[in-house]
Amino acid sequence: MTYQTRTPGSQASLREANRRRIVEALHKHGGLSKAELAGASGLSAGTVHNIVKELSSAGILHTVDATQSGRRAVFVTLARELGLVAGIHISRRHLRIVLSDVAKTVIAEHEMPLGKDHRADNELRKSLLLIADMLDAVGASSDELLGVGVAINAPVERHSGTVMAHGELRGWERVPIAEILQRGLGKPAWVANASNLAALAELRMGALRGTEHGIFIDINEGVGAGLIIDGRLFIGNSGTAGEFGHMTIRENGPKCSCGSRGCLDAVAGGGAVLERLKDTYRNLKLSDLLARAMAGDDACIRAIAEAGSSIGVAAVTMCMLINPARIVIGGEMSRAGELLLGPIRREVETSFLAGEGSTPEIIQAQVGIRAGVLGSILLAIDHIEIARSALRL
C-alpha cells in the first residue's frame, strides 16, 4: 500500500504512522491476535481494531476467528496471494529466513546470529524448525509452501547446488543443502551464491533496475560480486562467475581462506579490516568499526578507505572485462557510505581506460542487508514459475 506524504503532526500523519506500526509488527512476528498486536505495536486496542478493519477492507491484512487460551480471538496476518515460498540466507555469522507469497510480499521474517564455526547439520535442522514455526505463525499449512530458495556466502556449483571446497564456510563443503531441505519439507529447494542472489534482488527491486550491464559488489566479512550482462544475472559455466573476492591483488599478501595469498577477500574484506585493527581495538565488530568511522575515528576511517582503494583496483579489472554502466556497492560495509565508495570511485575513475562519459556510475545499494535473503525468494519463485510454464506446454 502506498501512503501519501502528510504534514508532520497532522491526524492523517498519525494514522499513517500507526498503520505502518501495525504492518511492521506483522512483518516481524508473522501473525498475531488483535490483543497481541496492540502489545507489539504499542497502540491501544481501539486503534488496532480500527486499523485492522481498514486494512482488511483494503486487502492488505487478513483476519480469521480463532480461539486463544480458551477465549475467542481475531488472528491477524498480512494478506497473501495463493502459495508461499521460503527464503534462507546463510552467511558466516548470520541466519536469515523470510516467508513470502508468490507476489513477493514478505509476510514473516526471522534473523539470528551464528557462531563462528557453525555446523551445516545444526543450521539446516534449525532452518526447518523455523520455517515450520513461521508457517504456523501466519496461519498457513505446509501444503501452501511451494519451495525454498537458499542464499549462501560461498561458491556454489550450479548443477549440484553444493558448496565448493574453497574454505569459505568450513563444514559446508559438498553438503547436499537442497536435498536435505527437500527431504525435511517435502518441497523443492534451490541453492545459489548469496552475492549473485543479492545482485538479482538489486536488479529486480533496487539500484540495478533498468541496467543492462552492471556489477554488484557485496562487502561483508568477505567480498563477493554478482554480474549483470544483457540485463540478466550471469553466473558462468559452473556458477562461480563473479568470485571477486578471490582475485589476487597483492602478490605474497595475507593468506586467504581459499588457501591462496593476496586475495581481495584477505586484503579488503571486513574480516581483514578488523584483523588489522585488533591491536588498536579489542573485540571490534563490523558494526563497531562502522559506528566509530561515522563518528570520526581516524584509524577506522583510514582502514575503510584502504579497503575501498583495494576494492577499486580490483573493480577496474572487472570493468575492463564487461564495461558496466553501473557498479552498486552493497553488504554491511556499504553502510560506511562515501567513506568506502569515495576511494572505490577514485581508483576506477583514475585507472579505467574508457572514453569520456563512459566511466561507470558507482552508487550505494538500495535493498540493504536483506538483499541476499530476498534474492533467495526470487530464486525460488523463478524456478516455480518455470515449472508451472512447463506444465502448461
Image: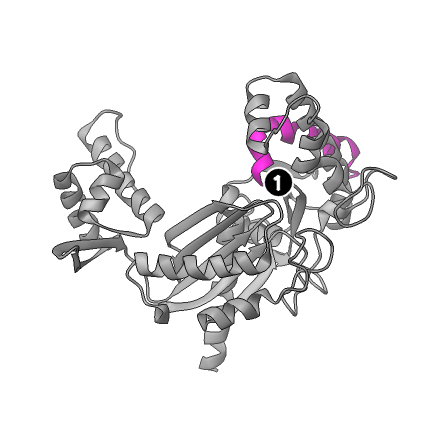
Q: Which residues are magenta?
A: 329-354
Residue 127 in picture, x, y percent from top left: 47, 58
State the residue lying farthest toward the right. 252
In the shown orientation, is residue 49 left or right of residue 215?
Answer: left
Q: Quadrant of residue 250?
A: top right
Name the residue located 71 percent from the left edge and 23 percent from the top edge.
279
Q: In this rendering, would 215 be left or right of 23?
A: right
User: Tag 1's secondary structure?
Assistant: loop
Majority SS type along the magenta span? helix
Residue at figure coordinates x 67%, y 64% from the top left: 174
Rendering quarter of residue 77: bottom left
Instruction: Please tell me which residue lies in front, 10 or 53.
Output: 53
Residue 337 among those drawn in magenta: yes
Tell me, yes or no, whether the highlighted magenta stretch contains residue 89: no
| Label 1: few (<14), some (14–19) or many (≥20) C-alpha neighbours in 10 Å | many
Give the percent coordinates (x, y) of residue 369.
Answer: 52, 42
Mark yes or no: residue 344 visible: no
Q: Number of numbered discs present?
A: 1
Could you say where residue 122 lies in the image, as x and y percent from the top left? 54, 57
**50 above or below 229?**
above
**On the picture, is 332 further left or further right than 269?**
left
Q: Amino acid at mark 1?
A: Asn
- Residue nearest the observer in this picture, 69 or 267: 69
Q: Which residue is mark 1?
A: 220
Residue at image position (71%, 56%) is: 241
* Lateral position of residue 251 relative to residue 371, left or right: right
How is the model colour-coded? one colour
Q: Is residue 187 above or below residue 315?
A: below
Q: Is residue 110 visible?
A: yes
